[in-house]
């Protein structure tokens, strides 16, 4: 064999084909990634000015008009689908009075989806606010609100405590055929309740539930003057209670006579 051919044959035998294949595959992958990145970059440049053209509102809001949601969203920069600040849009909708939570997401190529969850109003708070079912105060108005919502009053920051207490007292009274309409918590954390009959219960600061139960137990045995009705029941005593009366109005007397 010719010396040169023999030398070439030896070199061929000593080649590491696994290494050559690995390096070749790596180079192919790198080249492919560069091409893909370049393609995506070019595509983004071409579509960077894609505008938001469609909006879908989900969640079936009851008190928040869809027009108000759209107006709030239009305050954001909608000129670019990719550059749209979703958190900013979310905050704009969140600022609407009845909105409790909101989620916003983009859907290619030109749509944003907004899912709205509203507050569930369960009571009025200090006449000018509302309380939701989590005991949180919020400010909103609507002619769609139920007229039977209870009225709660108390110092700022006590709304959750007031709502929890209202639910407790309401349950106790309801099973005994009483309807609780209003509750007030004073600055000194003294509690008062109003029933739908107009009777006011003064509970004081301690043993609130125990004193409500005392009223429930004693009420059926109460005696009061003719043409008079119970005005208030003072339950701030360790034992017993004090009752004050007021005259029955003429209209109420007529209703009783008709009955």
Image (cartoon, grey):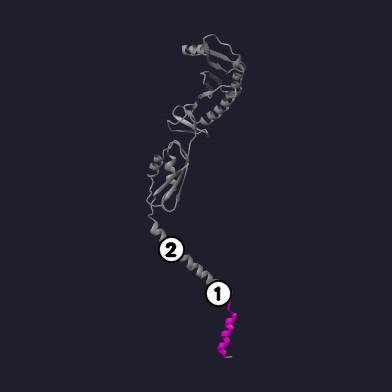
The residue tagged 2 is: 39
The x, y position of residue 71, in whole percent, is 38, 42
* Residue ID at (43%, 45%): 56
* Residue ID at (42%, 46%): 55
The x, y position of residue 229, in whole percent, is 52, 13
Quick one: which residue is furthest to the bottom in this view?
Answer: 2
Few, some or many residues within 10 Å of mark 2 (<14, 14–19, 20+): few
- Where is 164 relative to 224, above or below? below
Q: Main secondary structure of the magenta part?
A: helix
Q: In front: 154, or 196?
A: 196
Nearer the observer: mark 1 or 2; the answer is 2
Residue 9 on the magenta segment: yes
The x, y position of residue 219, in whole percent, is 59, 16
Q: Secondary structure at mark 1?
A: helix
* Range of magenta residues: 2-16
Few, some or many residues within 10 Å of mark 1 (<14, 14–19, 20+): few
Quadrant of the image occupied by residue 143: top left
The residue tagged 1 is: 20
Q: Secondary structure at mark 2?
A: helix
Quick one: which residue is furthest to the top in this view?
Answer: 226
């Amino acid at each position: 064999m010719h010396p040169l051919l023999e030398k070439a044959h030896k070199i061929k035998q000593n080649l590491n084909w696994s290494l050559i294949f690995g390096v070749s595959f790596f180079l192919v992958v790198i080249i492919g990634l560069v091409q893909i990145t370049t393609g995506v970059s070019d595509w983004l440049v071409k579509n960077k000015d894609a505008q938001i053209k469609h909006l879908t509102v989900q969640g079936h809001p009851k008190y928040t008009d869809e027009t108000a949601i759209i107006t709030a969203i239009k305050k954001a920069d909608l000129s670019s689908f990719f550059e749209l600040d979703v958190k900013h849009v979310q905050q704009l909708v969140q600022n609407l009075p009845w909105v409790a939570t909101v989620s916003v997401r983009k859907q290619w190529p030109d749509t944003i989806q907004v899912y709205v969850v509203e507050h569930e109003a369960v009571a009025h708070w200090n006449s000018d606010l509302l309380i939701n079912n989590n005991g949180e105060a919020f400010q909103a108005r609507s002619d769609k609100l139920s007229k039977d919502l209870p009225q709660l009053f108390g110092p700022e920051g006590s709304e959750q405590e007031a709502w929890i207490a209202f639910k407790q007292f309401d349950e106790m009274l309801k099973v005994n055929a009483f309807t609780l309409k209003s509750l007030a918590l004073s600055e000194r954390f003294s509690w008062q309740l109003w029933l739908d009959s107009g009777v006011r219960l003064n509970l004081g600061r301690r043993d609130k539930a125990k004193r409500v139960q005392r009223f429930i137990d004693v009420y059926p045995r109460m005696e009061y003057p003719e043409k008079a009705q119970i005005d208030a029941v003072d339950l701030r005593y360790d034992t017993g209670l004090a009752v004050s009366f007021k005259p029955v109005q003429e209209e109420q007397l007529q209703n009783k006579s008709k009955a």
